[in-house]
Image (cartoon, rainbow, N blue to C red):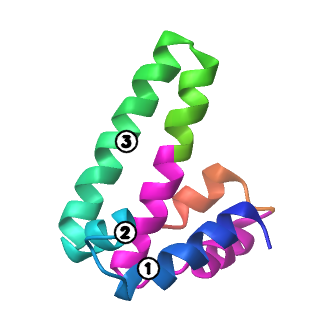
Amino acid sequence: MTTLQSLAATIAARKGADPETSWTAKLLSKGPEKCAEKFGEEAVEAIIEAVKGDRARLTAEAADVLYHLLVMLASRDVTLAEVEAELARREGTSGIAEKAGR
């Protein structure tokens, strides 16, 4: 199991947890819109660090982005496995060709 798969499993397990004892449960209890908002905030922070060029801060923000992406997906019952399957489906296809097919 990869680190992302393990994290996704932990997030899924926290869906029913007490929001007073779990940050993940607290986020999920606020609904998909709030989860999406937090993901957006973290993405902007990662962009800022990418522009600044601070590798350590970008690495930390990228980890936050991945966590919040998984929480957002969980809030809509989309699994990491589904996202991985979509990536696998696209593998070997030119990005230009894939976009043209949408």
Above or below 85: residue 3: above
Q: CA distance from mark 1 to mark 2?
A: 7 Å
Of callouts 1 and 3, which one flags the residue occurring earlier in the amino acid sequence?
1
- In the image, what residue occupies the spot 68% across and 71% down? 5
Is residue 29 covered in magenta? Answer: no
Q: Position of residue 12 (x, y in %)?
A: 49, 82
| Label disc, if present, on residue 14 of the rendered structure | 1
Mark 1 residue type: Arg
| Secondary structure under the numbered disc 1 in the rendered image | helix
Measured as percent of width and height from the top left, residue 95 is found at 65, 51
Q: Nearer the viewer, mark 3 or mark 2?
A: 2
Query: Label 2 near label 3: C-beta < 8 Å?
Result: no
Q: Total marks drawn?
A: 3
Tell me which label, 3 or 2, sits earlier in the chain: 2
Nearer the viewer's eye, disc 1 or disc 3? 1
The residue to which callout 2 is attached is 22
- Place of residue 32 in the rendered image (x, y in percent of width and height, measured from the top left): 24, 72
Q: Are marks 1 and 2 in contact (CB under 8 Å)?
A: yes
Which residue is depicted at the point 59% across and 78% down? 9
Element under disc 2 = loop
Q: Residue furthest front?
A: 21
Q: CA distance from mark 3 to mark 2?
A: 19 Å
Would you call the spot at circle 2 few (<14 residues within 10 Å), some (14-19), or many (20 or more)? some
Q: Which residues are magenta?
A: 64-91
